[in-house]
Image (cartoon, rainbow, N blue to C red):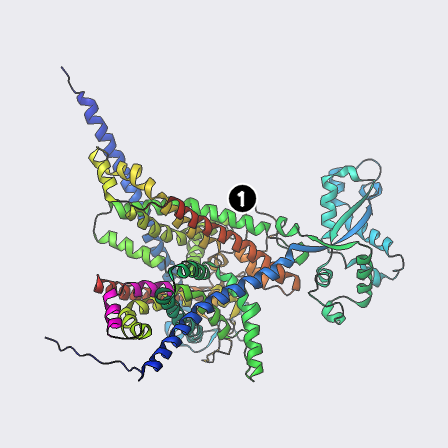
Amino acid sequence: MTEMTFQMPDLPKGLAKRHKAEKRFRLMALASVLLGLIFLAVLFINVLTSGADAIRQSKVRLDINLQINDFGGSKGPDIQQLKNANYQGIIKRTIYKNFPEVKSRRDKRGLYRLVSSGAAYELREFVLDDPSKIGTSISIWLPASDDVDMIMKGKVSRTASSDVRRLSDQQMEWLEKLEAEGNLETKFNWTLFSSGDSREPELAGVAAAMVGSLYSIIVCLIISFPLGVMAALYLESFAPKNRFTSFIEVNINNLAAVPSIVFGLLGLAVFLNFFELPRSAPLVGGMVLSLMTMPTIIIAGRVAIQGVPPSIKEAALAEGASPVQAVFHHVLPLAMPGVLTGTIIGTARALGETAPLLMIGMVAFVVDVPKSILDPATALPVQVYLWSDMPEKGFAERTSAAILVLLAFVGLMNLTAVLLRKKFEIRW
Amino acid sequence: MFEPDQKKVELVPQTRNWRERAIMLTLLGASSVAVLTTVGIVASLIFESIQFFRIVPFTDFVFGLHWSPQMAIREDQVGSSGAFGAIPLLVGTLLISAVALTISAPVGLMSAIYLGEYASPKMRSIIKPTLEVLAGIPTVVYGFFAVVVVAPLLRQGGESIGLSVSSESALAAGFVMGIMTIPFVSSISDDAISAVPASLKEAALGLGSTRSEAIKNVIVPAALPGIAGGILLAASRVIGETMIVVMAAGLTAKLTLNPLDAVTTVTVQIVTLLTGDQEFDSPKTLSAFALGLLLFTITLALNVTAIKIVKAYREQYD
């Protein structure tokens, strides 16, 4: 028999001291919980306050006279002339008219810089949408430049030196004149949700990244959901207890813990270099993400299937159903809420995944909203990464705004999963 | 007289058997995708790594103390050798992981203790899911937060006490990673602690120990294998984490153990080597796969050990 020894732990002498130690310990434990909660709060407050600024964008109102000559004379413009008209020239002409005292070329250039370089594109869109406006005078709000926007939002002090402000004293005078006349205001930033990436913060939006993410997630779901559910069904209901089965199980458990970047390397080596699928495409992104999501779905699916009482399957078998019928007609439908919950949680994780997408080239500078799963695209978290690296101050708030959009989607999906579990979970 | 239709009775089961077998095979095929994925990962990593080790000797990679994968673009360029020693990357990875674990291991364990032993059921039902939110936030968000908030704070804090803290310090990246893994450690510790039979705790309390004494001297030692397994799993997560370090850690490899310095990690180098346009067969690109193989091996070893520890321990009290 082995000898049992009991070692008295080192306890402080005296009850008061021991109670004090108890209190200290309890406080430390509470402090640990609070550390996590405080960090979470600071993170959210920081992202919210910074991202809220991106909801508004400074715009300049211009009363533009769209002369017929601008669009190729009196014959009535064709579509090509509408597309190629000198919109920049029209905007310049209009601004210079508002400031007749500005004469020198250098000053004029400084004046035009108050308006975003993308203003011409917006005017072009406006005219292409409604060519009947040609020949009339219109009043239109066009985006101001990033530097003006930062001043308007108070991100950069008006009294800062012109180097910090990136605007000269003269430009500040013009800015204040526009503002006083009510021709410079911050307005709701539709651009943020309707356009793709841009080098200019005032023109950059998350639309292309959102669509890219959506395509990848759809591809990911189409592949991983059926495969995951089938694998879970097989392992839980049909698999014979042999070495191959336990090998599959070990594989799944290990895959769930493989770093995401390794899946990216797999995608690069196999999907891109071996099968020569297109780079930067949501198709490949979705395929890589599906390999990562599958273990999550399988593990959650198995737990859900285990939760269905065996009596249900046995009853079906006794009534003459085949094993496959018993499982597909009776067990699977009852396990579905749990399977779906696991799928949604896995998909939410895939939505926030960045590293594997970097490996397969979804870090492209994407201006146009992708039209198919083979077009070059980026994804929301990758957009966050790209913008966070940009030197312009305007991108900082847009990064936060993109994070907010991402968090909203991830949060919404997780909330759905929780509600689904609460509503449909059956306690046997 | 009733005569069963022989044909029908036989036909139904036959087609059914046929279909069932096909369904079975499909299900088996679906399960094998997991195996295929593992095979794909291992094969592609090994295949590319072998090509890399043909150019750069294996020993240079594993024992080399210098990492600067700059290869010549043209043949005649000067200083074209490039160095592929993985040690500085490993040390950097371990340094950042050590910082992360010194935060997440005690904080995660203490959180689990508070939620399991001290908090009221109502408080627990609110705090636990809130803490789990930390695990659901995409890592790119943590990376941004590390760059924008944590790193400048540490820098200012360091300056005020006369320390020079790099703006890409291992401390900032490690701290944020540590916070990220708190719910991870805490939920596994929670499982381990609640698996300890209540009789052990009750015996300790019955002998007159205070709650904290029962926790420190009885519960935690009994749950230690499970907790250790959880910490190992957290370590494997931290070592493989990419976005936080890509955004908040440095790019140049430096062999140092000072957490205030900028270091780089295995994952950061994989990303820098493979983003942007490169020839696929250059040693620079291939080295990323060798690093991937290294990363895969380390995390696999950690995971297998952790799962073994957790399993062995679970059986002890069942």
Reply above or below: B268 against A362.
below
The residue identified by callout 1 is A372
Callout 1 secondary element = loop
Q: Chain of mark 1?
A: A
Q: Residue at x 61, y 49 (%)?
A: A368
Residue A326: quadrant of the picture: top left
Res. B298 visible in picture: no
Is B207 included in the stretch rendered in magenta? yes
Q: Quadrant of the N terminus of chain B?
A: top left
Q: Main secondary structure of the magenta part?
A: helix
- Residue span colored magenta: B185-208
Res. A197 visible in picture: yes
Residue B153: x %, y % from top left: 56, 74
Tag 1: residue type? Answer: Ser
Reply above or below: B17 against B301.
above
Q: Residue at x 62, y 53 (%)?
A: A205
Could you tell me how many numbered marks the image carries?
A: 1
Residue B238: x %, y % from top left: 42, 67
